[in-house]
Amino acid sequence: MSTATVQDKVATSASGRAGIEMMTITVRVKRFNPELDSAPRWVDYQVEADPTARILDSLHKIKWEQDGSLTFRRSCAHGVCGSDAMRINGKNRLACKALVKDLNPNKPITVEPIQGLPVLKDLVVDMEPFFQAYRDVKPFLIAHGNEPTRERVQSQTDRDRFDDTTKCILCAACTTSCPVFWTDGQYFGPAAIVNAHRFIFDSRDDAADERLEILNDREGVWRCRTTFNCTEACPRGIQITQAIAEVKRALITRRVI
Amino acid sequence: MASGAKGARGTLYRGREGMWSWVAQRVTGVLVFFFLFAHVLDTALVRVSPHTYDQVIGTYKNPVVNLLEVGLVGAIMFHAFNGLRLIAVDFWSKGPKYQRQLLWAVVGLWAVLMLGFLEPMMQHTFHEWFGW
């Protein structure tokens, strides 16, 4: 059984370093230093890696032992904060969730910044356009009428309606996997639409129309070409294309259900 | 230790069926557009004179144009069926969930119809090349 073998390996590496079968992998990083380089360049690093460890560990090893100038973002390192989205072997992933053994370690593993946002240095991009689109969809509860004295009650069914889109960690893996966003940086992008969806379909919120109007823009939901790259890239497994389609339908029928 | 690798271009994004069907939809769309362009021009020749029209259409009767025609039918059929799939993805609540199965249905339907089309469409070419 393959699962049993994997668990055995994890058990050995946790109990002591002796049992781990380490392997040498090549990590090919697309680097760019704005103070020295006129264009990005690929640099290969050889690293000793545990196949069951994450590619983030290899990046740490490079930074701590080989080249301290390697620059990337990471914070929690456990797939929660959404800081370390990068393009690994041609796909957007979180470096802290991509295991070496899943990335064909026999070949060089390519690591490059997410596409469509300006590269500041190495793997660090300017997230400001991404967060601007997020802010533009008003990602906060807007409720009119009398303030309730206790909590705003919601049925389980109403809560489930938007459960999927509450899981977003704003890592930008979806938005920067979108071919439309690559060529048209004005497009709101999947992440902003997901976070609009989270409030549009919330029964406690009163500003669905306002948000739908914002996304009715020519750079809004209608730019989506349903390539499903966002859905495949999302480290939280949010059905993003589905959420975007629901917003499209809400715009046509003018009904939020 | 660090060593330079060739080329600083980024990798091709490894999208799956959804991304490649989108690329195919774009490519077939452009092909159909250029066909329509030529088609409008040659049909407009009827206004010049029916004889000129017949002459121009007559030049199409060769294997090379025949292959282009087969390509055109293929492009139109894929574009049309995948277009229906995209409508289903946007307007059928289960569309996004079954987008992959829908794509394989599109490809399957396309292949079956193409196979059926080939014989009647390429009769002339088959005759010219193989004497069938």
Image (spheres, grey):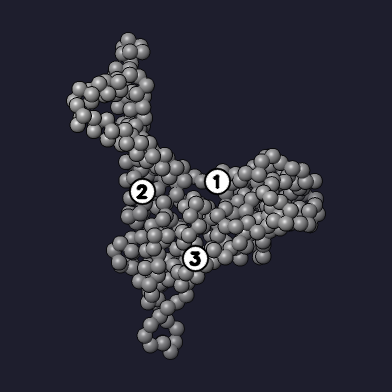
Which residue is disc 2 drawn over?
Answer: B86
Q: CA distance from mark 3 to mark 2?
A: 26 Å
Quarter the C terminus of chain A occupies: bottom left
| The furthest residue to the top | B131
Where disc 2 sits, the SS reads helix
The x, y position of residue A186, in whole percent, is: 48, 60
Q: Chain of mark 2?
A: B
Q: Residue at x 36, y 85 (%)?
A: A145
B48 sits left or right of A143 in the view: left
Dot 3 corresponds to which residue?
A133
Kindly identify the residue that appears in the image at 57 percent across and 65 percent down. Answer: A128
Res A117 quadrant in image: bottom right
**Amino acid type, label 2:** Leu
Q: Residue at x 33, y 68 (%)?
A: A256
Which disc number belongs to residue A175? Answer: none
Q: Do marks 2 and 1 share a subunit?
A: yes
Point out residue B123 in the picture as x, y percentages from the top left corner.
29, 18
Q: Position of residue A90 (x, y in %)?
A: 59, 46
Q: Which label's residue is closer to the chain start, 2 or 1?
A: 1
Q: Is residue A180 left or right of residue A27?
A: left
- The residue singled out by tag 1 in the image is B13
**Same-chain check, marks 3 and 2:** no
Amino acid type of the residue tagged 1 in the rendering: Tyr
A68 or A49: nearer the eye? A68
